[in-house]
């Protein structure tokens, strides 16, 4: 209820923008292939939900790819972060490599992934998504595992705690907020990765292909409705991450306080 | 200027019937020195420290900032290594004593884990030492009662004031019944009123448990009020220049803070600090500390 109240200004602004666009498009008689009216986008979405461009089945496939990529990228990011924090000397080798991988433009990697993992296989899109997700997870978790209060480490030392005990009772809880920050960024990135992967070919029933197909047929109302679905899916995944955060770290200032999440 | 030697064995207050030879000091420092930095530019933090602390004593280490009092405490707790001399706790090398969990540590900041409740923070060492759940619960609630925080057991640290957080840290340090309590300026961040209340609380805990305490502070009144002995230190390099015996009657309370003897002892400690400072300045030429020499126009 409180969350709804807090979001009222954002919803009002959104409604104002949509209403303004609708009026403008109608009054100025803007052609649909330049800018479709919000109502036209909505109609296109309903018309193509389960038939025509089949946006709903496409969204299911794209979401599956994004979630798969999110899982794979998160797992890889966690493994690398733990390994580097456990063996600090590997840091200078691993980090530059990770930065280099992160610097590769995603549009360059997508066709290669299609080639490696099969253009029709969902794994090629998951690979693109995973490559985007990996870095924010890895870098945040690594920071969380290593950015530990030195007095807390001395406290654990005074107990004669083993490195495993220090990791379990201090480093991992300390890294949780960092991980969740990375995860929130990663959710939307995974969706971007999946859609970009689809751009470079794949099954027809994917949001990326719907966007490409509708645009080439100058059906921009359908393109916009597919974009709308991608955005909604991204918001849904983000909200899921926020919910996980509230459950896992209720003690953290970003969750308990009035600070923005 | 050599370090003053305490009387052998030190004063024993509140001796407990704990295991170990009754006349064996809990802490024995012999010729302890600590040098930081590279071989070509060493900084002597501590030199020739000799100190014995008996069972049940409350000893404060006081001195100007940079005199190495915290370093000395960390040497006793084996959180850093001595470069010279030997550090023994309960007749064992400091490392052995640390691994045997002979001491509890309280830092300047409470160092509570935000993700744990107050109770679970106190439980932390017991978990690490593999105590069973029932004894963890019992011990944690005993300790919270000792520091008067029973009703806050289920709260999180951020819901507590600074003084309360430091009380949780004390409860945690005492949870596994160590024979020695090491406290590093634990009340430095608290306001004067809270600090005085915490002082009385620490004294009452000390009296009830009979634990040996080494307490680092830069507050003269705090050191005098709490201690059975005050070890006065000077900087450049850190040395124990004088030991002031505090013969104020116990239990100590408000009347202690208003007694003439208390004020005399404060003056005595203050003068010992001044004397140590002058001696330190005199030895500047041979044992220079970089940040102070420039300011005083000494030899660089």
Image (cartoon, grey):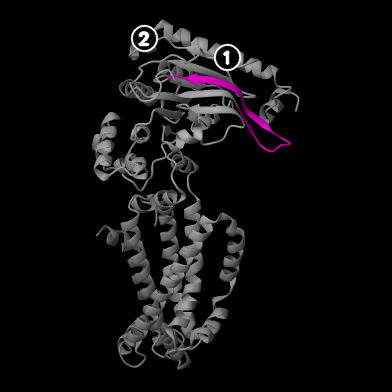
- Seen from this angle, which residue lies furthest front? B21
Disc 2 packing (10 Å; few <14; some 14–19; many ≥20): few
Point 50% across, 35% down: residue: B95
Pointer 1 residue: B4
Please give the chain letter of the residue carrying mark 1. B
Kind of element beneath mark 2: loop
Pointer 2 residue: B249
Closer-to-camera residue (A155/A253)? A155
Residue B42 locus on image (x, y percent): 69, 33
Q: In this view, does B95 lie above or below B298?
A: below
Residue B86 locus on image (x, y percent): 56, 28
Span of residues in magenta: B33-54
Residues at marks 2 and 1, CA–CA distance in whole angstroms: 25 Å
Quarter of the image with the C terminus of chain B is: top right
Q: Does A25 lie within the magenta span? A: no
Left or right of B76 on screen, residue B204: left
The answer to whether residue A205 is visible is yes
């Amino acid at each position: 209820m409180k969350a709804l109240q807090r979001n009222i200004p954002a919803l009002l602004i959104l409604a104002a923008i949509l209403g303004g666009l609708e009026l403008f498009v109608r009054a100025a008689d803007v052609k649909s292939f330049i800018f479709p009216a919000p109502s036209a986008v909505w109609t296109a979405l309903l018309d193509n939900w389960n038939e025509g461009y089949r946006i709903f089945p496409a969204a299911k496939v794209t979401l599956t790819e994004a979630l798969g990529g999110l899982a794979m990228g998160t797992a890889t990011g966690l493994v690398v972060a733990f390994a580097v924090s456990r063996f600090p000397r590997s840091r200078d080798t691993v980090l530059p490599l990770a930065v280099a991988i992160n610097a590769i433009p995603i549009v360059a990697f997508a066709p290669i992934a299609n080639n490696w993992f099969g253009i029709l296989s969902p794994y090629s899109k998951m690979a693109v998504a995973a490559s985007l997700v990996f870095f924010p997870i890895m870098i945040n978790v690594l920071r969380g595992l290593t950015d530990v209060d030195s007095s807390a480490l001395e406290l654990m030392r005074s107990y004669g705690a083993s490195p495993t005990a220090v990791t379990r009772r201090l480093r991992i809880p300390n890294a949780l907020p960092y991980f969740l920050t990375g995860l929130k960024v990663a959710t939307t990135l995974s969706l971007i990765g999946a859609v970009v992967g689809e751009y470079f070919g794949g099954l027809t029933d994917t949001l990326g292909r719907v966007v490409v197909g509708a645009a080439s047929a100058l059906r921009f109302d359908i393109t916009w409705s597919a974009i709308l679905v991608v955005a909604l899916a991204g918001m849904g995944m983000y909200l899921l991450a926020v919910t996980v955060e509230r459950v896992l770290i209720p003690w953290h200032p970003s969750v308990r306080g009035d600070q923005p999440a | 200027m050599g370090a003053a030697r305490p009387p052998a064995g030190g004063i024993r207050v509140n001796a407990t019937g704990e295991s170990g030879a009754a006349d064996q000091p809990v802490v024995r420092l012999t010729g302890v020195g600590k040098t930081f930095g590279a071989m070509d530019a060493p900084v002597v933090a501590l030199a020739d420290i000799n100190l014995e602390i008996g069972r049940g004593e409350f000893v404060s280490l006081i001195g100007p900032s940079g005199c190495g009092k915290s370093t000395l405490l960390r040497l006793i707790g084996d959180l850093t290594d001595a470069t010279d001399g030997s550090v023994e706790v309960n007749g064992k090398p400091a490392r052995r004593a640390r691994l045997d969990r002979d001491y509890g540590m309280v830092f300047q900041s409470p160092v509570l884990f935000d993700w744990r409740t107050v109770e679970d923070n106190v439980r932390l060492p017991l978990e690490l030492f593999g105590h069973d759940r029932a004894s963890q619960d019992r011990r944690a609630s005993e300790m919270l009662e000792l520091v008067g925080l029973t009703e806050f057991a289920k709260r999180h640290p951020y819901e507590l004031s600074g003084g309360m957080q430091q009380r949780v840290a004390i409860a945690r340090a005492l949870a596994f019944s160590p024979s020695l309590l090491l406290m590093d300026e634990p009340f430095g961040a608290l306001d004067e009123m809270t600090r005085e209340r915490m002082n009385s609380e620490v004294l009452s805990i000390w009296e009830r448990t009979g634990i040996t305490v080494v307490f680092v502070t830069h507050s003269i009144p705090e050191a005098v009020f709490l201690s059975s002995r005050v070890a006065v230190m000077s900087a450049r390099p850190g040395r124990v220049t004088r030991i002031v015996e505090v013969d104020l009657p116990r239990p100590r309370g408000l009347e202690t803070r208003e007694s003439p003897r208390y004020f005399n002892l404060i003056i005595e400690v203050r003068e010992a600090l001044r004397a140590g400072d002058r001696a330190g300045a005199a030895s500047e030429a041979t044992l220079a500390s970089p940040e102070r020499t420039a300011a005083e126009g000494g030899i660089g």
